[in-house]
Amino acid sequence: MKKEFPLAGMSALITGGAGGIGSGSAQLFLEDGCSVTLMGRRIDALERARDRLQPLAQNGAKITLVVGDAMKAEDMKRAVAAATESTGRMEICVATVGGGGFRPLLLQDEKSALEEIAFNFQPTFLAIRHSIPVMAAQGGGSIVCISSEAAHQPQTWLSVYTAGKAAVEGLVKSCANELARHNIRVNAVRPGLTRAECTQGMFSSEAIVKASSAARPLGRLGEPEDIAAGVRYLAGPESSWVTGQSFAIEGGGELRGPVDISEMAEAVFGKEVMAKILAGKEV
C-alpha cells in the first residue's frame, strides 16, 4: 500500500526545537512529509536533534536549523524567514519555549515574578505575532502553543508559573478569535508532568514519580511523544475545524486534583524557610 503524506510539501517552524516536545513534534511532521525549521539557543543541541531526525524524514522533507532566542523579536523574525525560504510558505508554527520551577510566592519578588511570566508569555506571543503576515498572505495556517495543566488546575508553590501559562491560554483564545478572518487557527496543548531536560530532577525522585503517577487515572507520567501526538493533530488538516482550544494531555490528572509537593519544597528550600512561609512570614 502506498504511504500517504498528509503534510507533504508543508513547512513548520518549531521553537525550542531541540527539546523533547519540540523534537518529538518535528519527528511526526517529518514522517508526514513536512519540512521543519528547528529554532534554539544551542547549536550543539540542534545538531544532535537534526542528526537523529534526518533519517526519519519522508517525501523529501528537510531540516533547517536556526540559532536564536525565542524571547527576541529579531531572532523570531529570522526563524520565520528561514522556515519560508524554500517555498515562500509556512503552514505550521509550534511554540514550545517556556517553563519555570516551583517557588513559594514569598520567595518571589516583582522582578523574578515578571521574568517568569515573561518567559512563558513572550516567546509564545512573538511566535504568533511574526507568523501572522506569512500565514495571512498564503491564506491560513496553524499555530500550536504549549501550556500546562497548571493553567487549569493551580498547584501550590507554582503560583507565578500558573499565571504565566494562564496568560498563554488567554492569548491563544483571543488570537484564535482575531485571526480566524485569515484562516489562521491557534490552539494549545496542556501537558501534565512530562519527561524533559528541565524536569529530570522530578523524574529522578522515586517518591515524586510514584505520587504523581498515582494521582493520574492512567497511572503514569508523560513522555514527549504523548505531547507531540497532540501537537501533530492540532497542526494538521485533521483539526481543520478546531481553534481557540487547549487540549489536556496529562493522564487524567485534572480529574483528581494536584499532587501535594510540600515535602519536595521542604527538601529544596529547607524546613526553617518553609515553616516561615507556611506561617505567612517574610523570609
Image (cartoon, rainbow, N blue to C red):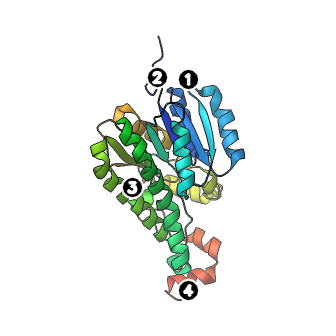
Give the alpha-carbon distance from disc 1 to disc 2, as whole Å: 8 Å
Dot 2 corresponds to which residue? Answer: 5
Of badges 1 and 3, the one in the foreground is: 1
- Please report whichever mark, 3 or 2, sits nearer to the chain's N-terminal start: 2
| Mark 1 or mark 2: whose residue is earlier in sequence | 2
Earlier along the polypeptide chain: callout 4 or callout 2? 2
Residue beneath disc 3: 254
The residue carrying mark 4 is 276
Q: Tell me the number on the disc at residue 238.
A: none
Q: Give whichever of discs 4 and 1 has the lower sequence position.
A: 1
Tell me the kind of residue under disc 2. Answer: Phe
Residue found at x 69% / y 40%? 47
- Marks 3/2 in contact by CB < 8 Å: the verdict is no
Name the residue nearer the viewer: 108 or 75: 75
**Amino acid under disc 4:** Lys
Percent of width and height locating residue 174: 31, 56
- Residue 9 drawn above or below residue 17: above
Task: Say whether residue 24 is visible.
Answer: no
Question: Camera-side residue: 178 or 120?
Answer: 178
Per the image, the residue denoted by label 1 is 58
